[in-house]
Amino acid sequence: MQKLRDDVTSWFSFLVIKPYGPGHFVHGLTMTGNVFRSINGPIDRAESVDSTFATLNHSKARNVVVQGNTFNAISEPIYNPCILEHTQASDTQTWTVDFAPSLPFNGRAWTVKAVVPVGAIQSGCANIYELPHSEAEQGGSGSQVKLNWSRACRRSVNLTERMDNPT
């Protein structure tokens, strides 16, 4: 399926959810294999929430899959699950990874699925071999994940996170 933008404003979205009361949430949404393309200038996002009457309850999101899409002239592409590579340049015991604005519907970083080192993690001049524990839904909007290491360290990890409960 190909989605085109002809002449619309930058805040236009192809998919808009408009809750008409409290407690509404997304359950069982799949957006895969689409081409979201804007022709006459970029748009902000492919999806949005119209909060005129209410907002979404992000803590109840279930089975939301957004992958395999193409975003042309879309300022903020979205993914769920979302995989980011985070690089920590200096030795720090707690790393903060921000997934905004990559999560659909400005969701919360709810479920950490994987933390995989990219090469050796180093503390000072020595390699460390243990993995961190994670804390999801951090920061003001809940879009951050904190990785807590046993000691201050640096380098890179690939972090897989979801804005929903996949079960």
Image: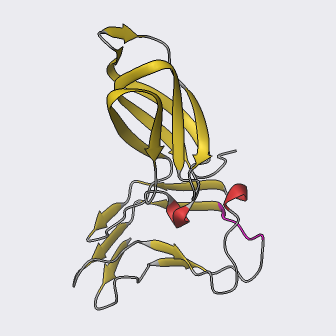
x then y, percent, for residue 109: 56, 49
Residue at 71% across / 56% down in the picture? 59
Report which quarter residue 68 is drawn in.
bottom left
x then y, percent, for residue 132: 53, 23
x then y, percent, for residue 101: 44, 60
Q: Main secondary structure of the magenta part?
A: loop
Can you say whether 156 is above or below 107 in the image? above
x then y, percent, for residue 86: 36, 37
In the picture, the quarter occupied by the C terminus is: top right
Residue range in magenta is 23-27
Residue at 45% across / 36% down in the picture? 159
Q: Nearer the viewer, residue 109 or 25?
A: 109
Can you say whether 165 is above or below 126 in the image? below
Q: Nearer the viewer, residue 159 or 139?
A: 139
Residue 21 falls within the magenta-colored stretch: no
In the picture, the quarter occupied by the N terminus is: bottom left
How is the structure coloured here? secondary structure
Is 106 situated left or right of 36 in this image?
A: right
